Image (cartoon, helix red, strand yellow):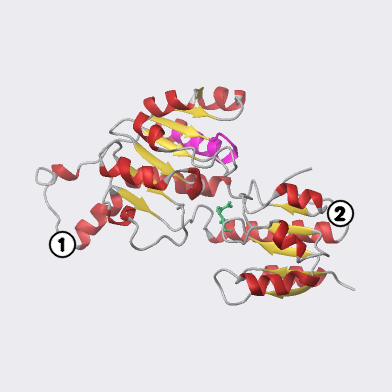
């Protein structure tokens, strides 16, 4: 008998076919997030759960209790802040994620946010489309900032952080500062990246880029005090998780001119509340959590997550376990 699996998200035909070869598959077909009552019902007899780190219910004790046969939860994301690792460990449930395949794609988006905030691309796109094309002398108020040869401070120098550093160093001739749990000698050698304490990085960088995973240690890592340390001309970029910053503190820093602008892929609440003041600010560029959202990368992540799931359910080691 094939193991039972529930996919708590819509999946492509290709992934559906692959999973169906090995598992008895049921899935959420309605798009968006599965309501908890549906999820709880569906997981009561499954051995595998296929889900996503950024749009999933918490995989915690309360959920695991309702899934007594569960052997593996496979995230279609590199982030796994939806996992309560201790609860998984306690019940011998394996958690997996999809690192590596998205590094370059997320780094591209991070750079897109750097460029679009610094050069005010989104704001000026509106300008052109609204028929407000003016000569350079007339629109000096809308001049932006250079990106090349400036200083980029990366908080969280993991695989994606390094892919961003590579672009910054070799594409834009930037100086790289970084802050991380541990020193990264290879990044220092390859990208001339300089390790600094967080406060030093914040006070020196022209662009502060947050790329750290969300953990109890990084929850609201950027708050009032941290934004205060940034230069008034500095731009803040967040491609990690909304909860790694105190969003209200960011709003205040922007409103009071403590920092110049922000490029945001992630928010405290997703989807963002339409009345959030960030949406009214011309120096803030927002995108809807699309770090890995290219067709090629999303397909690779979805298939990798399926392979992780099938590996465990067929008695093999998972390719990308989140804990050993
Ligand atoms: C994913 C992400 O696309 O991988 C992550 O951790 O935040 C995103 O890039 C998202 O989780 C949807 O799969």
Query: Does mark 1's beta carbon lie closer than 8 Å to ligand 1?
Result: no
Q: In which quadrant of this rendering is ligand 1 seen?
A: bottom right
Expressed as whole percent of the image width and height from the top left, the position of residue 141 reads 15, 43
Span shown in magenta: 156-168
Expressed as whole percent of the image width and height from the top left, the position of residue 172 reads 40, 34
Expressed as whole percent of the image width and height from the top left, the position of residue 46 reads 79, 69
What residue is disc 2 on?
Answer: 316
Residue name at image x 37 percent, y 26 percent: 203
What residue is disc 1 on?
Answer: 131
Is-magenta flag for residue 162?
yes
Magenta span dominant secondary structure = helix
Quarter of the picture holding the N terminus: bottom right
Q: Are marks 1 and 2 in contact (CB under 8 Å)?
A: no
Residue name at image x 74 percent, y 47 percent: 86
Q: Nearer the viewer, residue 82 or 2?
A: 82
Q: Is residue 12 visible?
A: no
Q: Nearer the viewer, residue 81 or 157?
A: 81
Is-magenta flag for residue 9?
no
Expressed as whole percent of the image width and height from the top left, the position of residue 79 reads 61, 49
Lower sequence index among marks 1 and 2: 1
- Label 2: element kind: loop
Closer to the observer: label 1 or label 2? 2
């Amino acid at each position: 008998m094939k193991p039972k699996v529930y996919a708590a998200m819509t999946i492509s035909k290709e992934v559906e076919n692959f999973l169906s070869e090995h598992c008895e598959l049921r899935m959420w077909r309605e798009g968006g997030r599965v309501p908890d009552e549906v999820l709880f019902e569906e997981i009561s007899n499954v051995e595998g759960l296929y889900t996503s780190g950024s749009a999933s219910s918490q995989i915690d004790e309360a959920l695991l209790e309702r899934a007594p046969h569960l052997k593996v939860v496979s995230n279609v994301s590199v982030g796994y802040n939806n996992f309560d690792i201790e609860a998984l460990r306690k019940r011998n449930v394996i958690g997996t994620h999809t690192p590596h395949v998205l590094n370059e794609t997320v780094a591209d988006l991070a750079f897109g946010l750097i460029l679009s905030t610094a050069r005010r691309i989104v704001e000026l796109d509106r300008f052109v489309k609204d028929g407000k094309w003016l000569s350079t002398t007339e629109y000096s108020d809308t001049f932006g900032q250079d990106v090349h040869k400036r200083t980029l401070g990366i908080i969280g120098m993991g695989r994606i952080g390094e892919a961003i550093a590579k672009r910054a160093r070799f594409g834009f001739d930037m100086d790289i500062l970084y802050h991380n749990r541990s020193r990264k000698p290879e990044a220092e050698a390859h990208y001339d990246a300089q390790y600094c304490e967080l406060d030093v990085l914040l006070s020196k960088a022209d662009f502060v880029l947050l790329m750290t995973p969300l953990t109890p240690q990084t929850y609201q890592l950027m708050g009032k005090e941290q934004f205060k340390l940034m230069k008034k001309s500095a731009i803040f970029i967040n491609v990690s998780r909304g909860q790694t910053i105190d969003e209200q503190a960011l709003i205040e820093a922007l409103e009071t001119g403590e920092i110049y602008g922000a490029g945001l892929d992630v928010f405290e609440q997703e989807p963002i509340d339409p009345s959030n003041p960030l949406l009214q600010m011309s120096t803030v560029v927002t995108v809807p959590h699309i770090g890995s959202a290219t067709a090629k990368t999303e397909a690779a992540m979805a298939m990798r997550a399926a392979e992780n799931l099938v590996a465990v359910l067929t008695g093999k080691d998972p390719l990308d376990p989140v804990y050993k």
